[in-house]
Image (cartoon, grey):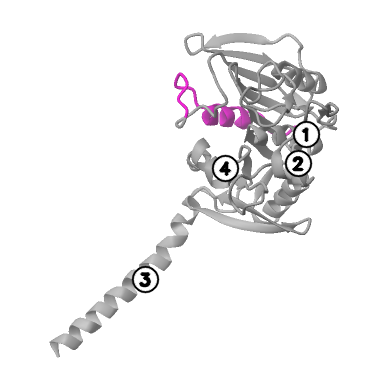
Amino acid sequence: MVHLLDMKAKQTIVIAVIGTIILVTPLFAGCITSKHHLIYDGKIRTYLIHIPPSYTGETPTPLVIALHGGGGNAQHMEEKTGFSLKADEKGFIVVYPDGTGKLRNRFLTWNAGYCCGYAYENNIDDVGFIKTLIKKLQNTYNINSSRIYVTGHSNGAMLTYLVAAELSSIIAAIAPVAGSIGGYATNNSPLWIIPQPSCPVSIIAIHGKLDSHVPYDGGHGVNASGSRMDLSVNESITFWVQHNGCNPTPETKIINNGTIIVDKYSNGRNHTDVVLYTLANGEHWWPGSNYQYQNFSATDTIWDFFAKHPKVKT
């Protein structure tokens, strides 16, 4: 009899625990990053999405799309940037799409027009994928259409520039880290540059002066794959300063004990700005918890810029 009572008691406890989990899980669901997919251009495209715990669906919420570097994947981008923690703190949705490759979840790349790897070689339409992804997210979540942002590292930064150019009516601001607007796929290829955008887009770019993959002054990086040559940071920034109609003379300040130069080109059309952070001793990094650089956080700096730059339409 005692044994049967013990069994019933244990069953009651298990049921109670399961019920508690079922009830509590929705409260914390926003803190979890989950994997999703969509079909685009006949291919299964995957992405991670992180919903902040503050999200209720009642208030239009900013969206940040974070693009991993060449050879990486969505999970690596989440871990490297810490954008999910920032999303929980500030209340925005962050999505980490996957590029494509021969392997399902490793060595993935983006087609940024002149680079890189599998995606470029197979002419993958990554801009179309990102556009479709944004539409799906808008249909699923209460996205603030004036606050859609894109950031990326390396090959992902190259695609970030391209997405801003081709989807300039949608994107409010971008943050390329260690990228370029174009270059030469090989030393025998013609010059490729992102197309002229139809609308102004605010830009915050971060680039290490000592970058050996995407050289600050342009050309072929000593650690770059193949014979690709990139346009310089100056050429990339000038493209957007001219397109946005910003003041061509920047306000310059030096911070972090002289290790970071900040050039701000202001007063662009529709209240756009172009800001360049030059890391004097920086390599091909995403500065932050993984790659310490004078206590400078690319993620914090990018979000602060995004928060001040909604899409202004006239």
Is residue 77 found left or right of 191 in the rendered image?
A: left
Frontmost residue, 200 versus 44: 44
Q: Quadrant of the N terminus?
A: bottom left
Tag nearer the camera, 2 or 4: 2
* Marks 1 and 2 close (CB-CB < 8 Å): yes
Is residue 219 found left or right of 36 in the rendered image?
A: right
Of labels 2 and 4, earlier in sequence is 4
* Marks 2 and 3 close (CB-CB < 8 Å): no
Vertical position of residue 139 compared to residue 154: above or below: below
Is residue 299 within the magenta segment?
yes
Tag nearer the camera, 2 or 3: 2
C-alpha gap between disc 4 and disc 1: 32 Å
Q: Which mark is residue 114?
A: 1
Q: Which residue corresponds to the image point at 79% horizontal and 25% vertical from the top-left?
A: 187
Hey, what amino acid is under mark 2? Tyr
Q: Which residue is mark 4?
A: 92
Number of residues whose C-alpha sits closer than 10 Å to that of mark 1, classed few (under 14), some (14–19) or many (20 or more): many
Vertical position of residue 34 compared to residue 5: above or below: above
Of labels 1 and 2, earlier in sequence is 1
Where residue 134 appears, as percent x and y from the top left, is 71, 48
- In the image, the segment drawn in magenta is 291-312
Hey, what amino acid is under mark 4? Phe
Q: Which residue is mark 3?
A: 18
Which element carries disc 1, helix, strand or loop? loop
